[in-house]
Amino acid sequence: MAILKKIVLIGPAWPLRGGISLFNVRFFEALTQKGVNTHVIGFQRQYPALLFPGQSQDTPEFKPCVGKRMIDTCNPLSWIKTCRYIKGLKPDAVIFSWWHFWFWPCFKLMVSFLSNAGFPVIFLCHNYNTHDKADLWSWFSANVLKKADGLFFLSDFTRNQRREKYPLKVSLFHPYYEWEKWPVKVPDNWSNKILMAGCVKSYKGLEIGLGLLNLDPKLEITIAGDIYKPDLSKEIRGLEKKFKNRLRLYPEYCSDENLVKLMDEHDLLLCSHKKATQSGMAAFAFGRQKPVVVTPVGGLGEQIHPKTGVVAEEITSESLLKAIAMIYDKPPKYWAKGIAEQREKNSFTYFAKKICDSIEKILHSQNVV
């Protein structure tokens, strides 16, 4: 069997903010611990300012730079320069992170260059179809992925969106985010506090989650994350006045430390999505041993294992309330124990092993190593 010695991982990493940046940093660390010489190639400029509706593209707190920031998605000369740099590294395989159609022209050129140079190209797909205008955007995904030697997905749902045959097409999982420097303390009792976290977009079903406040006067909800639409921000501010202390709003990107604190202050994470592939925020909650309630859409249900959370029967406030009641029927330590039992097979260490084992099969079939 071929032995994987060197990988280039292309995608966002610190100090760029966001879930995929954190994912790549943890993936890089796991590959390095496994003994794979891993080079991270990140972005000088990920999005032009006009296309990025958030407050900043960098993390609010200091983060050490992971890898080399070489790619400017608006400058094709940087794409060519990066490919030449990768060619000089002579990696056994190149892994691209794929999640948004904006990267199509950049990655299209780079994949063509690297494939023609004889390097196996792998895509790690966080999304295949985006959550809006899927027909158009799926064309971009299909076009850039067609030269891949292998595709990895974080859910069966996403894998099934790509029906064409490939040398390798593997469905994996979204690993948990754990933090050694912030130990988990499981509370003894429930507080009736629910967290909805992550950038606020229309497909995340905010109105469905907030409908819980009309159904149960004991519940309190916190919304934390960038709000990309000003009119939505005004609407939530109005609801804040209506429900007073039962609705709290933190309309900004949360640092890792602040998100840990928010998770620890609440009973559970609520994902009231109308569309989804999988949830990085759910992986964050599981890392804090918090149960998760999700709607039955996309690949969200695949992240829920026995004793880690509940999948609602329908995409309604009433169904979410029933699911939350099922959480509250058991004490916090019941769910924390169930989540802890899933840690090993949902770790980045295990994820890296599965990726490496699969890539080695590709290398063996191609007699690359």
Image: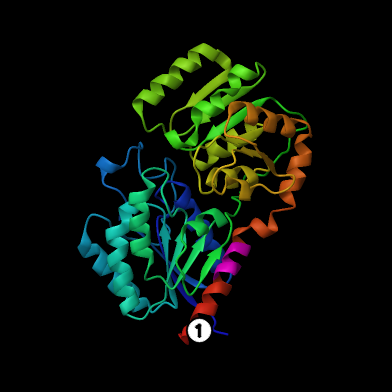
Q: Position of residue 347 (x, y in %)?
A: 63, 58
Q: Nearer the viewer, residue 265 or 169?
A: 169
Is 131 rendered above or below residue 79?
above
* 54 left or right, relative to 272: left
* Residue 142 in sight here: yes
* Residue 43 in sight here: no
Q: Residue at x 41, y 53 (%)?
A: 99
Is residue 354 found inside the magenta-colored segment of the image? yes
* 82 left or right, relative to 124: left
Q: Residue at x 43, y 32 (%)?
A: 252
The quarter holding residue 309 reads top right
Q: Position of residue 174 (x, y in %)?
A: 57, 54
Q: How is the image coloured?
A: rainbow
Q: Which residues are magenta?
A: 350-355
The quarter holding residue 12 reads bottom left
Residue named by callout 1:
365
